[in-house]
Amino acid sequence: MKFSGKLIEGTLLRRYKRFLADVELSCGEIVTVHTANTGSMTGCSEPGSRVWLSRSDNPKRKYPLSWELVEVKPGVLVGINTLLSNKLVEEAITNELITSLSGYSSIRREVRYGKEKSRIDLLLESTSVSDCYVEVKNVTLVEGETALFPDAVTERGTKHLRELAEMVRQGQRAVIFYCIQRSDVMNFRPANEIDPLYAETLSEAIKSGVEALAYCAEVTSYEVKLVREVPVMID
């Protein structure tokens, strides 16, 4: 997915109130920007980091600039905008990068489903095989060469796993998809030290038939795209 315009580079001063950050631009101006990430962003929100921002043309927005990327170490950019994850996965499916999710005739977004009144990120439909329910999670946390999720306790994420397991019991296909917006990883595992209930629920969901996929992305200041599958490690 290419960014619609040239990103603006700056230096992160601080992140606060979950959705806001202060950034110093190269010209010296200090701006407040929107941060589309509800997680802790551990390792991705250090003051002094190089960051890249996009600008919205929507005149109704209070903060026209949005934080998109951060350089976590020399040459390694991370996409922190969780709103991009669904688009990245849908683009990869459409381009047949994800072979295990190919062969479906249509993709619908944000479809209501489940006993707990959820919305599935992507519903893949076909007349010849069972529908496939794909729940997408954005991943930025890394330990060594291992990507981890979640980076904060997520009751909502645990609920989604229960919903996926229920769809399998009803005869449908269900996938939890970890979209890793960085390239410096070799595998993925649940962050059981952060949210043990999520890790336990993921293990149970996989045993019940839910499929777990993890792909990492190539991230540059002009484009983010999924490029490589990595193994999902479950204890």
Image (cartoon, grey):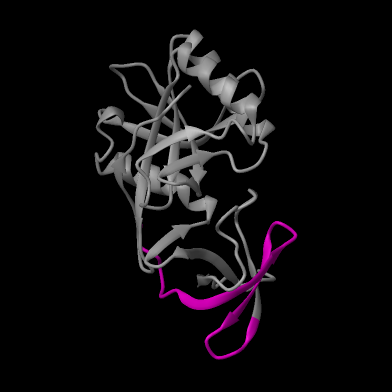
Does the segment drawn in magenta span residue 28? Answer: yes
Judging depth in this view, the residue of 224 and 130 nearest the camera is 224
Name the side, left or right, on which 16 lies relative to 52: right
Q: Percent x, y for residue 59?
A: 62, 74
Quadrant of the rendered image containing residue 220: bottom left
Can residue 133 be seen from the camera position used here?
Answer: yes
Q: How many marks?
A: 0
Name the side, left or right, on which 8 lies relative to 154: left
Judging depth in this view, the residue of 72 and 159 nearest the camera is 72
Which quadrant, please, contains the N terminus? bottom left
Name the side, left or right, on which 42 lies relative to 4: right
Give the residue at x 59% y 21%. Answer: 200
Judging depth in this view, the residue of 183 and 22 nearest the camera is 183
Numbered range of the magenta stretch: 1-30
Give the residue at x 56% y 56%. Answer: 43
The furthest residue to the bottom: 27
